[in-house]
Amino acid sequence: MALIFRSFIVLILCALPALAETIAGRAAVIDGDTLDIGAERVRLFGVDAPEHDQMCEHRGTAWPCGQAATQALAGLVGRGKVVCEVEDRDRYGRAVSTCMAGGADLGESLVRQGAAVAYRRYSLRYVAAEVEAKADRRGIWGGQMMQPEAFRHGTAQDAPVKGCTIKGNIGTHGRIYHLPGQTDYERTRINEGKGERWFCSEAEARAAGWRRAQH
């Protein structure tokens, strides 16, 4: 009888939904989509922000979009309490979470501002917010941007001077410069030995005799 009773209890416990894990408190902003709350490192669920040292192109000039994303998240978090519902744990042990501050979903707010992209690989939750930001050319959508995931994976050649990320390539079509986010930017490699070079602005590239890539 005791064995039957214990088995019955186990069945009941297995049938109950797992309790959600919540992390709450004052948050320290690490980058555009990462927070520290106490001893926990939290990665925002469903969004991907430019990396802290990532540069984008905005109105023809290099723009520190990674730093801008970090500042955007800091502005949303402020000095109040952040409440995060843990969705998963990633391979680094970070709590991948949906976080709220001041009644607003931090992930949605970042995407709506144009400070992050909807991370479609993991969720479609913020796609509508991204569509709105893109239509209004907010933040990262006001120019050219390499997807943060591509940037992290090292598909980009590092610029020798911070902020000078425009690639001046010499090929069969002449002297062409590529902006971050354009189609061929990631696979373009600069060979300074044959006269190719990096530029800090489109105006500089044009003055040197390069023309902008079409895509």
Image: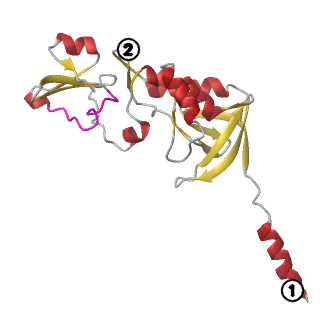
Q: Which residue is mark 2?
A: 59
Query: What x and y, as percent, mark residue 134?
Result: 49, 25
- Residue 89 in the image: above or below residue 84: below
Q: Which mark is residue 137?
A: none
Left or right placement of residue 19 versus residue 71 in this view = right
Please name the residue shown 65% across and 50% down the image.
87
Left or right placement of residue 155 versus residue 127 in this view = left
Query: What x and y, as percent, mark residue 186?
Result: 28, 36
Q: Which residue is mark 1?
A: 4
Please name the residue shown 64% across and 46% down the image.
40
Tag 2's secondary structure?
loop
Query: What x and y, as percent, mark residue 170?
Result: 12, 27
Amino acid type assigned to the residue bearing label 1 in the image? Ile
Query: As rendered, which of 11 and 19 lies closer to the eye?
Result: 11
Left or right placement of residue 92 versus residue 87 in this view = left
Please name the residue shown 62% across and 39% down the image.
36
Query: As rendered, which of 172 and 56 lies closer to the eye?
Result: 172
Tag 1's secondary structure?
helix
Counting residues from the start of the chain, the first of labels 2 and 1 encountered is: 1
Cβ atoms at labels 2 and 1 below 8 Å apart? no
Q: Is residue 190 magenta?
A: yes
